[in-house]
Image (cartoon, rainbow, N blue to C red):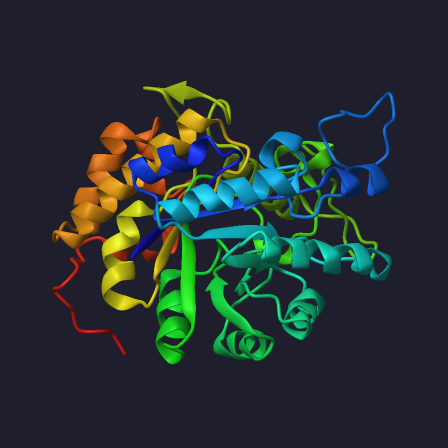
Amino acid sequence: MQILAPFDGIEQVPLLAKAGATELYCGYIPLDWVEEYNRKLPNLNPYKLQISLNRRESHHANLTSYEALKAAIDVAHQINLPVYVTVNAPFYAAENYPFILDYVKAIGDAGADGMMIADPGLMWAVRELAVKAKVILSTCTQIANTFSNRFFKELGVMRITFPRHVSLAEIAAITQRDPDMEYECFVLEGRCPYDDGHCHTLHCGGSICNEEWLLGFFDVNGHGLGFNESQRLKRHDESYRDYINPWPNDRTNLKGWRNMGCGICAIPYLLERTRISTLKVAGRGVDNLQKLKSIFILSRALKMALEGASGREIREMAQADLQPYPDLCEIGYRCYFPDGRALYEEVRYGRQLPCKS
């Protein structure tokens, strides 16, 4: 099983490899795109793009020159690590396509092993251009069943990245149905409260996902809401706020770690019951030390799983060394697979349990 890690600069490549990464991915936004499609206005953050190529609007989360991209790929290839480039905006406007087509050809020429793509039109174009790079379906495109799997396979997709809200049982069913496809899923870092495959929001406006929105409730037929119904809606709103922001601060650090999305205790189940071949760490734009810590802990968890540790034993290790708020782990906040605890708690790799019908 592979460990897929993000990087934002060539100096990170050998460090991530030493920490345990076996595959790498990065963003690449050439300055030509920045100048052509992004305005420079006094009231806008000069380091944030209004229109990105790849769901990361910060300059520091991307390589910004072809030379930097090619050099990073060359260094990775010298230590036998493949490199994938994110081209995963949900869609591109027709007027952007002349630029985009030259852009993906340049990525192929730089030696990238694959591209993470969300736009079906671009998948078709890459196939027509015969770019020598594997097409990986981005998590920004919804995969929820075997029919969508089949559709993207016909467009030339060779690997599928599952959105963060697909359950373990669904992953098992989909991957077992088509064993010829490659599959990856997230297990560490960014766990957005919203569904990747249905979210077209840009991050350039800040963390709007975590804003304290003021909500009002109204009856669709124009009737007033009763007291009991109003109270139920109020409790629903409070529960939602707790769901998106259950900890004191998103950047709170304890023991050198910040609170993050995590699903590493499901690794034995993923090994035993699914055809997931790659464990992915989110984090383009995250500081270097955080990336290295995440890869190190994931590498340790994978080693434990391959040696027969259960999901519960891996979770206990992670709670001691990784999770600043272990109680959030217990109740499922920020857990990648909160609905699957009963499935993977005692599963051990190499000790197949009978599947439930």
Residue at the (47%, 66%) spot, across then down: 159
Quadrant of the rendering where the C terminus is positioned: bottom left
Q: Is residue 82 left or right of residue 89?
A: left
Q: Position of residue 47 (x, y in %)?
A: 71, 27
- Residue 199 appears in the rendering: yes
With respect to residue 89, does 296 lie above or below? Answer: above
- Residue 343 appears in the rendering: no
Q: Is residue 329 left or right of residue 142?
A: left
Q: Position of residue 150 (x, y in %)?
A: 53, 79
**Number of numbered discs visible in the structure rendering:** 0
Residue at the (53%, 54%) spot, across then down: 112
Residue at the (53%, 40%) spot, across then down: 71
Question: Quick one: 197 or 338, which is closer to the camera?
Answer: 197
With respect to residue 53, does 254 lie above or below? Answer: above
* Quarter of the view holding residue 171: bottom left
Question: Quick one: 109 or 340, which is closer to the camera?
Answer: 109
Quadrant of the rendering where the N terminus is positioned: bottom left
Q: Position of residue 269 (x, y in %)?
A: 26, 59
Q: Is residue 1 left or right of residue 280?
A: left
With respect to residue 231, does 276 lie above or below? Answer: below
Question: Quick one: 121 or 190, which is closer to the camera?
Answer: 121
Q: Is residue 226 left or right of residue 113?
A: right
With respect to residue 246, does 70 lie above or below? Answer: below
Residue at the (44%, 32%) spot, across then down: 12
Q: Position of residue 26 (x, y in %)?
A: 54, 44
